């Protein structure tokens, strides 16, 4: 039996991460990496390349969220390990949680004490109006992995070991 290995990475520090307590970024497609975030992505790629021996042949597939910060991270990591950018496939199932009507809203105004209490009581199923819960996100990502990434990885006879890379 062949082993399918999926490696998930988070995007580097983004402009929204530096303003985390001001507004809810969520699916903001336009937020870019900060200089620190670019360095983090390059460091990860260098680590994999130099310390682990990962190269372009190590991955059967590379997927990224279509958010700018995720694409930038994927590009920088792949550059360091020798994966051509045209091998990166964008996948909406990998987008961050949808905060619905609260997207880009002011965090302190929306997350009142009452909302925080409700969220604390049931964090896995809590969702903003018109948004999705952590349970929804998990289902979306697992569905993608089970239907696309893992079967594709197992079907690739040339990957050693088989690993889709998903930032």
Image (cartoon, rainbow, N blue to C red):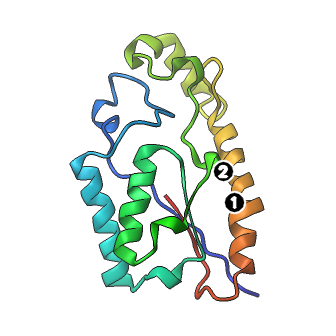
Residue 151 to residue 129: above or below? below
Q: Nearer the viewer, residue 167 or 82?
A: 82
Residue shown at 22% from the left, 49% from the top: 35
- The location of residue 61, given as percent across then percent down, is 59, 70
Q: Quadrant of residue 47?
A: bottom left
Q: Which mark is residue 141?
A: 2
Q: Residues within 10 Å of mark 2 (few under 14, many from 20)?
A: some
Residue furthest to the left:
35
Asked if labels 1 and 2 touch by Cβ distance under 8 angstroms, the answer is yes
Q: Which mark is residue 145?
A: 1
Residue shown at 30% from the left, 74% from the top: 46
Q: Residues within 10 Å of mark 1 (few under 14, many from 20)?
A: some
Cα–Cα gap, marks 2 and 1? 6 Å
Residue shown at 40% from the left, 78% from the top: 82
Q: Nearer the viewer, residue 87 or 91?
A: 87
- The location of residue 112, given as percent across then percent down, is 46, 12
Residue 60 to residue 101: above or below? below
Judged left or right of residue 49, residue 93 is right
Quadrant containing the N terminus is bottom right
- The location of residue 38, given as percent across then percent down, is 28, 55
């Amino acid at each position: 039996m062949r082993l399918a290995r999926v490696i998930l990475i988070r995007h580097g520090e983004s402009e929204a991460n530096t303003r985390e307590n001001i507004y809810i970024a969520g699916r903001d497609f336009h937020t870019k990496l900060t200089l620190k975030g670019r360095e983090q992505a390059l460091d990860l790629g260098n680590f994999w390349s130099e310390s682990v021996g990962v190269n372009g042949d190590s991955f059967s597939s590379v997927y990224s969220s279509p958010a700018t910060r995720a694409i930038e991270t994927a590009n920088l990591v792949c550059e360091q390990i020798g994966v051509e950018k045209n091998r990166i496939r964008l996948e909406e199932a990998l987008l961050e949680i949808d905060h619905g009507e609260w997207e880009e809203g002011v965090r302190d105004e929306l997350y009142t004490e009452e909302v925080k209490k409700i969220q604390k009581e049931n964090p896995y199923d809590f969702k903003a109006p018109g948004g999705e819960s952590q349970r929804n996100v998990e289902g979306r990502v697992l569905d993608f992995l089970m239907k696309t990434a893992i079967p594709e990885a197992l079907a690739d006879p040339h990957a050693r070991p088989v690993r889709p890379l998903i930032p």
